[in-house]
Image (cartoon, rainbow, N blue to C red):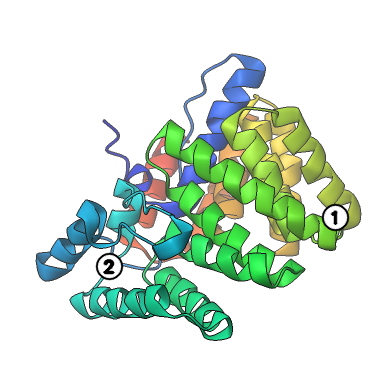
Amino acid sequence: MCDNYFCKHLKTIRFQIFVVVAALALVGVLFSLPKIIINKDKKNSLSGTAATANRDVAAGGDKGHGEAGHVHEGEDEAAAAHATVTPEQLSELNTLRKKYEQENNATTKLSLANELAGKYAAASKYDSAGYYYEVVAAARPGEKIFQKAADQYFEAFSFSATEDRAKSLGVKARSLYEKVLKNNPSNLDAKTNMAMTYIALGEAPMQGIGLLREVLAADPNNEKAVFNLGILSIQSGQYDKAVERFEHLVEVNPKHVQGNFYLAVSLAQVGKKEEARRVFLNAKKLDADPGFQASIDTELAKLK
């Protein structure tokens, strides 16, 4: 069981874990790497009636999405830990969904679907948000609405607690990003996220890496692409290349917390301990979270 602070948190580390898996498939070597996640939302535990509300949704309070036949799959453990759904939110969602299911006017029904998507997204129920945005996209297709749907499925994908669920949601997100790119081939955010589904699921990691390189060819300073390629460099043991990636990243964005952290990790791995120390200390200034501070102190102790 992981007792590291960063392993207990959610979103970004999920993708780093995915990238680790993909990289292992490429190089066949297991690396031990400090993992970092910065979660500004301190409300990452459930209690009392809010926890009950979440259990109600997972247990069946949100099973049906009307005529389209979508079945809510229940909250992943990680997503449940991330978001507290209040009884008020749950009641609002149930009421709004019933209105949607009973509405016969196509225009009004579409408006309700869009409203439901926003409410589900606000409640961190990303697969349901994606479903309703997809309903809107089916009726009124276009780049922006396809991306809204894709981004919500991508969020759900990032929180997936099981391999099967990750695959299902990742493939779904990818199919929608393909529609985004069909409408606008220069949408770099869609291309980056689609690349990560290929890498994360291990189906075609080199295709994903190729897409990330296409993003950098169009925008050499794209932070998401630089970061993900940096992580891949670490996982494949190319620490000198990782240093280059993360140095570039912190030049583009000096306050990129993860970029600074992994730059320090990479510098330590290539033997530049004093530089690593300096960057770790700089990273400490960027986020006051006690867990983050403690994790950096642990890394600093390894440099002695």
Q: Name which residue lies at 75% across and 29% down.
A: 206
- Name the amino acid type tagged 1: Pro
- Classed neighbour count for the residue bearing mark 2: other residues with Cα under 10 Å, few (<14), some (14–19), many (≥20): few
Side of 187 relative to 265 (left or right)? right
| Disc 2/disc 1 C-alpha distance (Å) | 36 Å
- Quarter holding the N terminus? top left
Q: Nearer the viewer, mark 2 or mark 1?
A: 2
From the viewer's side, name the closer residue of 77 and 266: 77
Percent coordinates x, y for residue 101 in the rendering: 39, 72
Extreme residue toward the front, this view:
104
Q: Is residue 254 above or below residue 155?
A: below
Q: Name which residue lies at 60% across and 28% down.
A: 22
Side of 165 relative to 256 (left or right)? left
Tag 2 and tag 1, C-beta contact below 8 Å: no
Extreme residue toward the left, this view:
48
Give the secondary structure at mark 1. loop
Extreme residue toward the right, this view:
217
Q: Mark yes or no: residue 14 visible.
A: yes
> Toward which corner of the image does residue 90 lie, by quadrant?
bottom left
Q: Name the residue under label 1.
A: 220
Percent coordinates x, y for residue 203 in the rendering: 64, 27
From the viewer's side, name the closer residue of 12 and 61: 61
Percent coordinates x, y for residue 113 in the rendering: 50, 75
Give the secondary structure at mark 2. loop
- Name the amino acid type tagged 2: Lys
- Quarter holding the C terminus? top left
Q: Name the residue under label 2.
A: 43
From the viewer's side, name the closer residue of 260 and 157: 157
Q: Earlier in the sequence, mark 2 or mark 1?
A: 2
Side of 218 relative to 163 (left or right)? right
Q: Name which residue lies at 47% across and 44% down.
A: 14
Q: Which mark is drawn over residue 23?
A: none
